[in-house]
Image: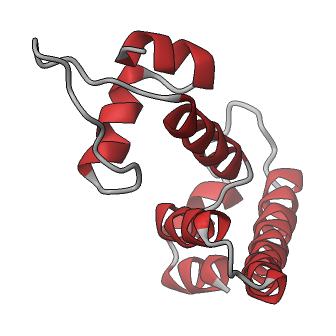
Amino acid sequence: MNIGEAAHASGVTAKMIRHYEHIGLLRPVPRSDSGYRLYTDTEVQALRFIRRARALGFSMERIRTLLGLWEDSERHSADVKRLACQYIKELDEDIRKLRSIRKQLQHLAMHCAGDKRPDCPILENLADDAGQDSARS
């Protein structure tokens, strides 16, 4: 099948398929005599795998590792689980940081009059070096 058909079958755009090939996430495929890429069901399945992994937020490097594990018949599920658990820890930390940012912004918004006066604690906090430091932590 050509790249358009592979894109349709996998749910990945032709542009992203080319990108995945360019960065080595997807192996180069053979080409027809006229130079068109020729995809098989194997590549389409790999593209679906990549699409699902991206939907879960995995980085390209982790997807590369996961693809390698998926294609390795000698793999150990412990390796896959370890990778997933590490990512879960990172997600938990990201969630903690986002909750902290939300709490700080909510506090600032509650103390902003939101009227025609020029003073605004949100802007004051953004302009304050100490406020910037507290937003990072």
Please report the residue visible at 82 percent of the width from the left and 61 percent of the height from the top.
Answer: 102
Camera-nearest residue between 120 and 87: 87
Camera-nearest residue between 10 and 90: 10
Q: Is residue 37 left or right of residue 54?
A: left
Query: On the image, which quarter does residue 31 sit in?
Result: top left
Query: On the image, which quarter does residue 116 sit in?
Result: top right
Please report the residue visible at 48 percent of the width from the left and 69 percent of the height from the top.
Answer: 61
Task: Note whether 133 is above or below 91 in the view shown.
Answer: below
Query: On the image, which quarter does residue 35 sit in?
Result: top left
Residue sticking out furthest to the left: 34
Picture coordinates of residue 88 (x, y %)? Answer: 82, 76
Camera-nearest residue between 27 and 83: 27
Please report the residue visible at 77 percent of the width from the left and 66 percent of the height from the top.
Answer: 98
Task: Note whether 70 is above or below 51 in the view shown.
Answer: below
Q: Is residue 123 left or right of residue 75?
A: left
**Does any portion of residue 11 appear in the rendered image?**
no
Picture coordinates of residue 75 (x, y %)? Answer: 70, 81
Camera-nearest residue between 3 and 12: 3
Picture coordinates of residue 38 (x, y %)? Answer: 33, 23
